[in-house]
Amino acid sequence: NNKISNQQQLYSVNGTLKLVNTIEEFKTFDIDSALKTESSLLWNDFVQGGTLENPQKLNRFYLLIFADLKKYIYHYWFAFPTFLVPTAFNLLNPVKSIGEQFPSDEIGAITKTLEANRLHACCLHRQQNSSFAVINLKQAVDNLNEKPQSASEYIFIVNDPSTDPAHPGWPVRNLLTLLYYHLRSVEQLNVICWRERFRDGQQYVN
């Protein structure tokens, strides 16, 4: 739908769709094995650096479906793999809305930047003139590993499907896990959980 596509930021997610022929096969399907396989694909991209170069690989899904077409009954099981890290992520400051953290002109500039790049996740690097330059995750990680003391100049942004004010969705956890694995000396990061909504033709960012 071109109208929707031009109005909203839409993002594709790679994954696996498994269709089974009977309800018995659906009920006895080895979900644990399927989820391990999907998680391995996700983790390999994390470790090998593919996700840093292509943030579309930040998330995967597994969808198991049995469709009883005679009765119009559909059974499905949906999973989005994510990971537990050895060290918990701690909030150093309370969560703030983007309006509390940035003036409206900067929010507008960030919005235009994201619309132009259409990335699942990226990084903003604050320049000396206080403007932002968009850099990819790999460049940000390389810069921070070379100069970890400059972490305050960088803001990582990830598109967040959650609507809970204080609890981000699984893409945020996956981004933090990815950065935890690749950043050697950085202990503090700035993260924006980007939530963009449209209502009655108006754009809302929070």
Image (spheres, rainbow, N blue to C red):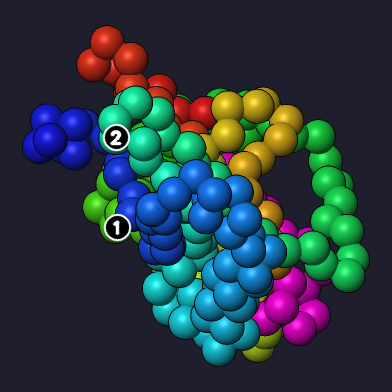
- The x and y percentages for residue 98 are 57, 32
Specify start and end residues of the magenta stretch as a single range: 180-193
Looking at the rendered structure, the kind of residue marked 1 is Asn
Q: Residue at x 23, y 16 (%)?
A: 201
**How far is mark 2 from mark 1, CA to CA?**
41 Å
In this rendered view, identify the residue nearer to me: 53 or 47: 47
Q: Secondary structure at mark 1?
A: helix
Residue holding disc 1: 117
- The x and y percentages for residue 36 are 65, 71
Can residue 188 be found in the magenta stretch?
yes
Residue at the left extreme of this rendering: 2
Q: Residue at x 50, y 45 (%)?
A: 23
Looking at the rendered structure, the kind of residue marked 2 is Leu
- Left or right side of 198 for 36: right
Residue 142 visible in this rendered orientation of the protein:
no
Determine which quarter of the picture holds residue 9.
top left
Q: How many marks?
A: 2
Which quadrant would the N terminus be assigned to in this image? top left
Can residue 85 be found in the magenta stretch?
no
- Observer-side mark, 2 or 1, equals 2
Q: Crowding at label 2, few (<14), some or many (≥20) Cα neighbours within 10 Å? A: few
Residue holding disc 2: 69
Vertical placement of residue 137 versus 82, above or below: below
Vertical placement of residue 200 versus 112, above or below: above
Residue 83 visible in this rendered orientation of the protein:
yes
Q: Residue at x 33, y 54 (%)?
A: 12
- Left or right side of 31 for 14: left
Q: Crowding at label 1, few (<14), some or many (≥20) Cα neighbours within 10 Å? A: few
